[in-house]
Image (cartoon, rainbow, N blue to C red):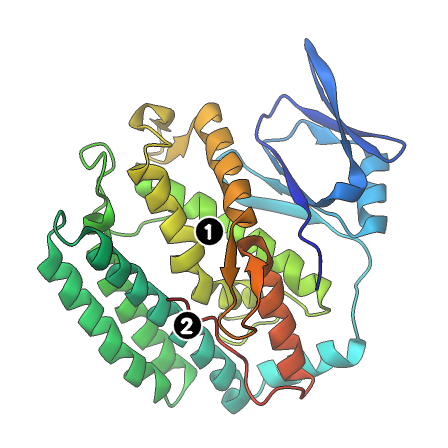
Amino acid sequence: MKKLLNTLYIASPEKYLALDGETVVIKEEDVQDQHLPLHNLEAIVSFGYRGVSPALMAACAERGVTVSFLSLSGKFLARVTGGVRGNVLLRKHQVLVSETQEESLAIAKNCILGKVYNSRWVLERTLRDHGMVIDAPPVKAASATLKQALLLIENSENLDQLRGYEGEAASRYFSVFDHLIIQQRDDFQFEGRNRRPPLDKVNALLSFVYTLLTQMMTGALEAVGLDPYVGFLHVDRPGRVSLSLDMIEELRAVMADRFVLSLINRKMVAASGFKRLESGAVIMDKNTRNRVLMEWQNKKQEMLTHPYLKEKIAWGMVPYVQALLLARYLRGDLDAYPTFFWK
């Protein structure tokens, strides 16, 4: 099993990254340089960067440490990676499967079954733990609708039909998401999912964390030799990591949504840590962004029992394990892609 290494998040646009031997040097005016061993890192994610030295980018590419550049709001800009890894036969078969409707549908179904199943259990967990303090009937009704949607998804006859069922289920789930916010309700109101740009604080958090999860999944797919740009559900588009977006579907609710709810309900973030731009977009300030990244790192270290492997692993390893299971399925070692069903 791969070892869970650290991701270095650079949240300040004033920082510059350089290389000193086998050490990453973080430079900032009027601040003493920080040094981190390169061998402890699996990725570097920089928000609103000043720059990264060519020497460091070369060292990262050589060692398989991905360097990603994002805007301050979390919008993906670019990635620096090394040579393509993995078996070329695996990638060729991945492309072949992606162009075969029946085989693509089988994998896509499992991803969406996992998404709706896990979304439902996020609702059920809230009903179990906080049923006396929330408006329970709408949440119960939404959970029942998602349960019914699972059968429809399983019987989908084509990808367009599957996308339709997935969209309806996601809309129903987010229609009661506001009920899952128990603390700071006046400050963190949620009236529905919006993005590009996010128009409220909850959506700003969701979009930001979805980006972090997508970056994790992209690195995991590359690590097992799959092409993150060749998907089965999301339409191929230049520059779009379609397979990463397919694979995070089953992890959105359990890794990202629960994390965002925890940040709000445990008062790790405050309304004062957000600002609205002239465009109407809502973004986090520097301190809030740093706190979210710190807590995300902590979340990645938490342990769980993987529902398929029946082994204890860190949450940060879940994207890699799912990518590995998909690769094994495509190689013919498994009869089906094992969906991540959380409960």
Q: Nearer the viewer, residue 134 or 115?
A: 134
**Disc 2: which residue:** 114
- The quadrant the N terminus occupies is bottom right
Q: Looking at the image, is mark 2 or mark 1 nearer the viewer?
A: 2
Q: Nearer the viewer, residue 141 or 172?
A: 141
What residue do we see at 67% from left, 88% from top?
332
Picture quadrant of residue 32: top right
Amino acid carrying label 1: it is: Tyr
Picture quadrant of residue 230: bottom right
Measured along the vertical axis of the image, is residue 303 above or below residue 293? below
Closer to the chain start, of discs 2 and 1, is 2
Whether residue 229 can be seen here: no
Question: What SS does tag 2 mark?
Answer: helix
- The quadrant the C terminus occupies is bottom left
Whether residue 124 can be seen here: yes
Q: On the rendered structure, is 8 left or right of 297?
A: right
Q: On the rendered structure, is 310 left or right of 58?
A: left
Picture quadrant of residue 244: bottom right
Measured along the vertical axis of the image, is residue 185 above or below residue 174? above
Residue 277 image position (x, y, % from top left): 37, 28
**Disc 1: which residue:** 210
What residue do we see at 65% from left, 64% from top?
221
Question: What SS does tag 1 mark?
Answer: helix
The outermost residue toward the right is: 21
What residue do we see at 40% from left, 33% from top?
283
Cα–Cα gap, marks 2 and 1: 16 Å
What residue do we see at 48% from left, 75% from top?
339
Measured along the vertical axis of the image, is residue 284 above or below residue 342? above
